[in-house]
Image (spheres, helix red, strand yellow):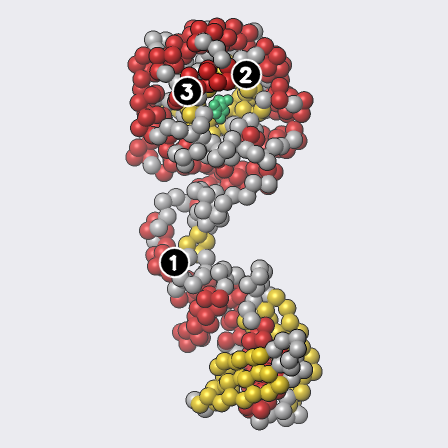
Amino acid sequence: MEKIIIFDTTLRDGEQAPGASMNSFQKMEIASQLEKLGVDIIEAGFPIASPDDFTAVSVIAKNAKNSGVCALARCISKDIESAGRAVKKARRPRIHLFLATSKIHLKYKFKKAEDEIVAIAQSSIRQAKKFCDDIEFSPEDATRTEKDFLFRMVEMAINEGARTINIPDTVGYSYPQEIFTLITDIKNNVPNINKAVIAIHCHNDLGLATANSLSAVLAGARQVHCTINGIGERAGNASLEEIVMAMKTRHDVFGNFNTNIRTREIYPTSRMVSKVTGFVVPPNKAIVGRNAFAHESGIHQDAILKKRITYEIMDPRDVGISESALVLGKHSGRHALDQRLKVLGFHLGEDRLNKTFQRFKELADKKKNIFDDDLISIVEDETKVVKPVWIFDSFEITSGTKISPVACVSLKYKNKIISAKSSGDGPVDACFKAIDKATGVKGQLQDYRIEAVTKGKDALGEVSLKLKAKERVVTARGSSTDIIEASIRAYINALNKIESL
Ligand code: KIV
Ligand code: ZN
């Protein structure tokens, strides 16, 4: 079994995501969760960048119990000094030096020749070595660097004592096969490569960061740079959760490798990073997105209930998510609805379930997500013991600021549709008067309340009312996403109750 070192750069490259900057307290909170997660090395920051980042790296270095703590530095003397001082108190300190090596960067960023770049990197590694033994060197933009020059830089860095050589795909330009060839070429062309660990650092500009990182592992990289939720500069970095879970899930391919990650801490860590940075995790984000273990289609839900592995390649509990969610929506089937209702305590017979399912489908056409409260409302509404005399069919209404409302309500009565029209003081009043006309029962409204029982702009409204008719007083409720319809349903429920007494 070979170990893949997980180098987490959430607090450094992750923080470079526009808008994700964290203060030293927030960084400390995340660092202690990263230790719980089991990352081998925490790249805690870029100490020269700001006094607060220096503090964050220093405090994390001092407090880390198990993870190594790394600080980033350019090949500039003051950076190295700052990084060296910041990680001084760590049990396992590391300085990560980087210097661009591609022609594009040499020509436009540095305006320097290759020999000058080699000399700068050489003296920087020497300086960094005075602060700690564990030096990681990154030839920035390695994937766009001329190979011969890259080999030369890597050989020199190892000769100077760098223990880890990181190969950054700085602009996320590479693709898996190319990365595989590059790592293989480095192994075959750098004579002292066996004295260092090869690391990979991929950006996600083309959505290939995870694939490229895994390809590097297959070619011989033994350290992977990654971030929680894949946050990082521009489109982000390879995400830790994807790399770790891909290796765990595809045991057939990655069976020779293991990591120290406690996968059950993945989800709590993801939530913490999202909360602290304010970066919302997209619902479809692999492993940690809200929908990663959620199933809406009836076919999928039915199969999942029979055997989870039909549509799930991972057990959600392995990443710290308690259970898969069967999200009820318009594609869901009777089986999933019944299952959910049972969880909510409703054991409906065939008949009541059929009715509830019909209402559920009607609601699902109007509403994206059906929440538990929606279901409770429907069940309560649909499974009244009262045998209805009148059944709601449809309504039409004209209303506005300059016209008085006129409603036409149709009801089913003894298998026939009866309709009546009426105006009123408001749209609800017009509907109630129309129902009175249609049923021939004069109702007296004693109380009327409306509230949203679910959240969102497509919330389900519930109307509760008290009605007096035929010398009897009853209370009744009705629900719908349309408050007029909810009112009509409540009124008709009340009339049916009165008839049944
Ligand atoms: O993307 C990159 O090249 C980096 C370096 C600092 C390693 O983040
Ligand atoms: Zn980067």
Identify which amino acid the numbered label 3 is placed on.
Ala
- For the N terminus, which image quadrant? top left
Whether the residue carrying mark 1 lies under 8 Å from ligand 2 is answered with: no
- The residues bearing labels 2 and 3 have C-alpha atoms spaced at a distance of 15 Å
Q: Is residue 58 left or right of residue 158?
A: right
Mark 3 lies on residue: 142
Among the 4 quarters of the image, the one containing residue 50:
top right
Pick whichever, 371 or 183, lies toward us.
183
Pick whichever, 209 or 370, lies toward us.
209
Q: Residue at x 59, y 15 (%)?
A: 79
- Pinpoint residue 13: horizontal percent, then vertical percent: 53, 28
- For the C terminus, which image quadrant? bottom right
Whether the residue carrying mark 3 lies under 8 Å from ligand 1 is answered with: yes
- Pinpoint residue 106: horizontal percent, then vertical percent: 46, 15
What element does badge 3 sit on? helix
Q: Relative to 56, say whether 308 is above or below.
A: below
Mark 2 lies on residue: 74
Q: Residue at x 57, y 64 (%)?
A: 459
Pick whichever, 490 or 422, lies toward us.
422
Q: Residue at x 31, y 17 (%)?
A: 185
Whether the residue carrying mark 2 lies under 8 Å from ligand 1 is answered with: no
Identify which amino acid the numbered label 2 is placed on.
Arg
- Pinpoint residue 305: horizontal percent, then vertical percent: 38, 57
| First-in-chain label (1 vs 2) | 2
Between disc 1 and disc 2, the foreground one is: 2
Mark 1 lies on residue: 297
